[in-house]
Amino acid sequence: MSINIKNLCFSYGRKFDPVLKNVNFSISDNTITVLLGLNGCGKTTLIKAIAGLFNNITGEISYNDTLLSSLSIRERSKLVAYVPQKISGIDDVKVEDYLTYGMVNSLKFYQTPSQSEKQKTIDMANKFHIEHLIHKNMSELSGGERQIVSLVSSLLQNTKIILLDEPTSALDLKNQSLVLSILKEISKRENKTIILSSHNPNHALFLECNVALMNEGKILKFGPANKIINVEDLRCIYGDNVCLSKDLPYTEISFV
Amino acid sequence: MKNKKTIIFLSASLLLFVIVFFLALMVGRYSISIGNFFKALFTNDPHFQTDRSVIITLRIPRTIVAGLTGIALSLSGLLYQETFQNKLTSPDLLGVSNGAGVGAALAIVIGLSSAFISVLAFAVGILTVMTTVLIAKFFRNGSSTILLLSGIIVGGLMSSLLSLIKYFAGNEVKLASITYWLMGSFANAKMETVYILLPIVAVSTIFLLSISWRINIVALGREEAQTKGINYTLYRYLIIGIATLLTASTVAFSGTISWIGLVIPHIVRLIAGRNTRKTIPLCITFGGIFMIVVDILSRTFTSEEIPLSAVTGLFGTIIFVIILFLKRRDYHEH
């Protein structure tokens, strides 16, 4: 049971250089995969391609031998949830309303969430300790709170796969730790397959997960974080200034 | 808490809608007292024949058309603002009003009857929006920005065509008719207008109410809507189609009426927040009330009717300043 990506290529237009160049890899069920790489290496594009946001990809993205491109928008949304880096169009939207939007794929076009579905939203909010936020507007939330709300909404979508585009990019250390801990817990307890992009290799080590090291639209290396994340490979991508924290002239602060 | 607030405002505005509607039937240059109003409508007393005639043949169709126009333009404004994630868009965003203006001006210059003025205004209005969508498609870019820019291009073209038609109108009476039509009026409203407008507005409104919850998700933008399971492209074109139909059909009969599509959605969002399940019903009542009140004012205070856009513009700017003052904290520099 896995996600298989074969010969995936994509460019944003005929006159543009390809952003994804022959990407090949497989992701097992109930695992976390962190996409690491420089800005513009194709992390976000790869996540959006798996989410089904591009029509003109070449190659294959399949789950258990089912091509994702063969699924309708509704069917795909029952398999894959996507948490964007920044949510747009949410000012004045109440958190409890936003959370219920995650359930739209299980409702008919004229239906709205029932009382039991609304209760499910409250239960999920309680589970992730955001019950105090549900009556607030999304615009009143901090970056970390917004990320967690967005994540909870994607969980209410009840999909096997969750894609997150740089979920920690706008967060302080405390909130980074909180969001990553939640992801770790979800993957284990709820049997979810999670793919996220990050700029921080420490996040992959913290999550004890797989890493796809990307460079110029290709997967350079793929495997467990403790094997892939090494100074030599990271220097190939990030440059010669990369070093281990023990070699730093100061004590690095991180989270556990 | 906001739920309760919405219910209170909706009930109060519904009651006000009914009051304003009946007030509009009594008030005007020919004033009818409450006693005479009921006698005219519910008795066959020949003394009230004139009152009866004024109410039934003039004021009832006119007030219904005013109410329907208010509902249609407010809903269109709300739909455009939500779909394009831009609070400053109005129903004529994709060129429908400019197009309808060209159609009407052409019909006036040719010398067609008022029915054909409406038909041509409606047809050219719809064709203009179709051109806007086609130009956006030509760029092979599905973004809302391209559609908006395409609307500005086509709207600009239509406005130039309108200037040309006015320049070549040749006859001062025709020029005055075009200018008067462009400023909006319900003076030509008849029961036939109601028979055409009512089903369009009623069916569109019922459909919008049935998908009102989903419009919230469309308003989150393509990425979020599509990955949550909404066919964004289909819904966006459906919403644009309904908004265009509502605007074109009302503009065809009443001319261009500015501000209402911008102001009413802002007022209802101030009350109910950003949730189309609440804002659509409020737009219906508030839009209807606003337009009927504007119509009463336009035909009551002077011997000649004041064009609707002049009144909506006057009230619209005052209300908009109040809204901006109330929401000033939301419009800070980032």
Image (cartoon, rainbow, N blue to C red):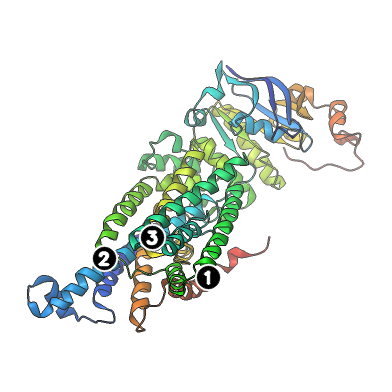
Give the mark nearest the N terminus, 2 or 1.
Answer: 2
Looking at the picture, does residue B152 appear above or below residue A144? below
Say left or right for B202 vs A15. Answer: left
Q: How crowded is mark 3: few (under 14 residues within 10 Å), some or many (20 or more)?
A: many
**Residue B220 visible, this orientation:** no
Labels 2 and 3 in the same subunit: yes
Q: In which quarter of the image is residue A236?
A: top right
The mark closer to the camera, 3 or 1, is 3
Give the mark nearest the N terminus, 2 or 3.
Answer: 2
Location of mark 3 (residue): B117
Say left or right for B9 vs A20. Answer: left
Location of mark 2 (residue): B61
Element type at marker 2? Answer: helix
The amino acid type of the residue labelled 1 equals Leu
Pick the front one: A141 or A79: A79
Element type at marker 1? Answer: helix
Looking at the picture, does residue B184 appear above or below residue A69? below
**Residue displayed at 32% across by 56% down:** B197
Give the mark nearest the N terminus, 3 or 1.
Answer: 3
Element type at marker 3? Answer: helix
Say left or right for A49 vs B181. Answer: right
| Mark pair 2, 1: CA separation | 37 Å
Pick the front one: B258 or B106: B106
**Residue B165 visible, this orientation:** yes
Location of mark 1 (residue): B326
